[in-house]
Amino acid sequence: MKFITGKHLSRRAFIGRMGSGVALPLLSAMVPAGRALAASSDAGGTTATRLVCIEESMGCAGGSDWGHARNLFSPAQTGRNFTLDTDSQLKPLEAFQDYLTVVSSTDCHMADPLNADQIGGDHDRSTAVFLTQAHPKQTQGSDIEIGTSIDQLHAQRFGQDTVLPSLELCIEEIDRGGGCAYNYHCAYTTSLAWANPNQPLPAIREPRAVFERLFGAGDSEQDRIQRRTTDKSMLDWMLSEVDRLSKSLGATDRVALDEYLQHIREVERRIQLMEARNIRDAGSERQMPQAPSGIPGSWEEHMQLMFDLQVLALQSDMTRAITFKTGFDQSNRTFPQSGTNKSIHGASHHGNVPDDIMDFHRINTYRMSAVAYFLDKMKNTMDGDESLLDKTAIVWGSPMGDPNLHNHIRCPLLLMGHANGALAGNMHVAAPVGTPMANAFVSLMRGMGHEMDKFGDSNGALDLSGAGATASTSAAAKVEGMV
């Protein structure tokens, strides 16, 4: 990080104390006079594409034969200008169709059992497979092994000069305690992000912890406790610095700075109100009475807070790689707002009964509505002359296809954003039957500036422009990932 000096600001400028300050959004004062942002080495590499990876556990209703035939996930039309059916799980995202690249019919066979001992362990493998596209070593010991995830490859390539090379988040409790099932280490079940084949990265669940990771990591515990016991915002402790910076900026930058700081203040206030409400209403009035006071009782509120924090992290260029695990395999959480009181895991075992498939689909669609909130925030947050959504690749998907069968074919995959031009959007790419999901990741990573010939079980690269697909004729490829 660098302190603010003179009228020109470094992209790494911040307000506050070293190690516990507030990083700034991209301002015009950060662009050297007479030089384009893209050519500016002092711009902090903000032309690098941000990557957000969101896992939806347990597949979707559109993964069943019945749901697929009715286009519950992927559109009926392929190519550009597709139409979303009324019942489509993607209907909540219709306003953002220009930013959607729907990828259908890809498989995650690295989550399949490779021998008899692994049969039944699909829930215990899936999460680790999603972003690595590698098969986990079956072990309960410390000798875990799988592959490096795409978010970590991106962090290693483009995140080394950011405050946080990567950020790992989750919604549900991930500390399972003790061993997990089918002789699989719990890390495979809980960790989306893998820094290397042997190093899973833990995820943060509490919004307050994420906020302090972004804006208060350098504070002492005593400082953080003191702030929590008052109604003051973290920004109230640095008003003089904010005022001094604001006076040095042009009118446009002052407006941008004020909007950014107001967003921080608003998110912090919502966290404070949620914590106070949980303490006040401890007991049966909360949707999740046993959850810690720092966890929103409402799934929707929790998702929105975590998405708002991600927007702040990306807007300030504090990180360029985020993973977000929105559920836990075999979760029994219910979503009454969806129109059914069934638990998501219970509904996922629909027995191929149409009415029961539609109950699961209602949960899928309700959960997708939270993603619409994120896209709206990203589209309306500017980063220079373009929105964050234009400069970001958002990977949403599941390593499971039809959860009723615990299979890993026809897995849902949705790429959102324009990724600095790597994704055109308004596109449905229907992969040839048997295409590994890893093929789509190879193309995406290449588009974001990675030199990648092979990843996981890829056997080629899936053309995300919709023009076609390329694949080798070789048999199952060796599980590996590299840049």
Image (tube, rainbow, N blue to C red):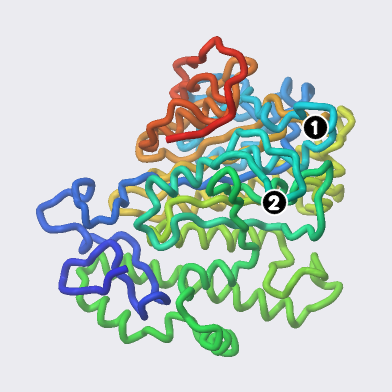
Q: Is residue 469 above or below residue 144?
A: above
Rendered residue at 24%/73% (across/down)? 4
Q: How many marks?
A: 2
Residue 221: x and y, percent?
A: 55, 83
Kind of element beneath mark 1: loop
Disc assigned to residue 262? none
Q: Residue furthest left?
A: 34
Looking at the picture, tell me which residue is in the foreground, 397 or 445. 445
| Circle 2 residue | 142
Residue type highlighted by circle 2: Ser
Describe residue 336's horizontal placement relative to residue 323 as left or right. right
Q: Is residue 52 above or below residue 310?
A: above
Q: Is residue 348 above or below residue 241?
A: above
Residue 20: x and y, percent?
A: 42, 76
Rendered residue at 72%/63% (across/down)? 298
CB-based contact (under 8 Å), mark 2 and mark 1: no
| Circle 1 residue | 406
Residue type highlighted by circle 1: His
